[in-house]
Amino acid sequence: MGFWPAVLNVLRNSDIVLLLVDARMPEMTRNSEIIEKVEKMKKRLIIVFNKTDLVSNKEIKGLKKKYHSAYFISGTKKIGINKLKNDLTNLSENWNSQSLRLGFVGYPNVGKSTMINLIAPKAKAKVSPVSGTTKKTQWIREGKLRIMDSPGVIPFGDRKVQLGMTAAKDPHKIKNPEKVALRIIEFLRKKGTKTLEKFYKVKEQKTDQDLFNEIGIKMKYLIKGGEVDENRTAIKIIRDWQSGKISLR
């Protein structure tokens, strides 16, 4: 079960649930299991797309067309935070109770604690690039807002490769990092932006494996005999993707 009991407690005790989604991978990180539980509890759900600074304006326009009532922010660039905070504050002023209870949920490392710190500067929620930093629920006050942070959780049916792509798992703890790195390469190449070639300053290759090897050679991650150190190369690619260094813009 992991952290699910703590997250379910957040859902039960919140008036409004804010689900954070990685704008780079909207369908992959739009936690369907949380959405299902929120709907069963008849709670109000607000979807917040984070890391919008890492995707193109075209991608954002497409998401806005599909998710009319969602918010689009960047925790690192502080984009869209004021609008979200102002709208939540206005809601709290008209709420028929002393405070409006907000529950922040989503995948591990999607940016919940960072966003909470921006909405409630005195909160000082612990932030780390390593998933699993928030291990229990905690209430934070900001005016009439009562904000509850929660541990990141993943749907029970999610595949292991997706855990690495969504930063839900530390690259060093992934059993097959090469597989995850190749999936990231495949994902990015399908976007047609030549993102990896630009980021690592390598030439375009015919296959995902060739590009993976080219990146390893460029980074000088080699082992005896001049072969590419696949484990080290894979962890580098995964870490760069998870941390947001690799942009889709």
Image (spheres, grey):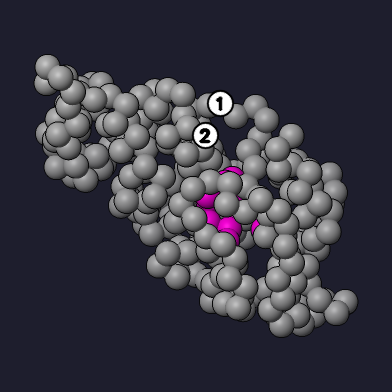
Mark 1 closeness class: few <14, some 14–19, many ≥20 residues within 10 Å = few
Q: Quadrant of the N terminus?
A: top right
* In this rendering, position of residue 87 left or right of residue 13: left
Tell me, yes or no, if residue 49 can be seen here.
no
Across the whole image, how many numbered discs are drawn on residues?
2
Q: Is residue 239 visible?
A: yes
Q: Residue at x 58, y 47 (%)?
A: 132
Q: Nearer the viewer, residue 53 or 229?
A: 229
Q: Position of residue 139 (x, y in %)?
A: 74, 67
Q: Which residues are magenta?
A: 104-113
Q: What x and y, as percent, mark residue 17?
A: 72, 58
Extreme front residue here?
224
User: Do residues under tags 1 and 2 come within 8 Å of each other at their CB atoms?
Assistant: yes
- Horizontal placement of 209 versus 6: left or right? left
Which structural element holds mark 1? loop
Q: Is residue 109 magenta?
A: yes
Measured as percent of width and height from the top left, residue 180 is found at 41, 28
Q: Is residue 22 magenta?
A: no
Tell me the residue that label 2 is attached to.
163
Q: Nearer the viewer, residue 51 or 150?
A: 150
Residue found at x 17% / y 27%: 222
**Which quadrant of the view contains residue 52?**
bottom left
Q: Give how far apart the Cα atoms at labels 1 and 2 are.
A: 7 Å
Where does residue 177 sit, x and y in percent of width and height?
39, 27
At numbered mark 2, what does the secondary structure look like: helix, strand or loop?
Answer: helix
Tell me if residue 20 comes above or below residue 84 in the rendering.
above
Check the image and report above or below for 168 versus 217: below
Q: Which residue is painted at 66% across and 39% down in the image?
A: 32
Residue plotted at (39% across, 50% down): 243
Q: Indicate the amino acid at tag 1.
A: Arg
Amino acid at the residue labelled 2: Leu
Q: Which residue is mark 1?
A: 159
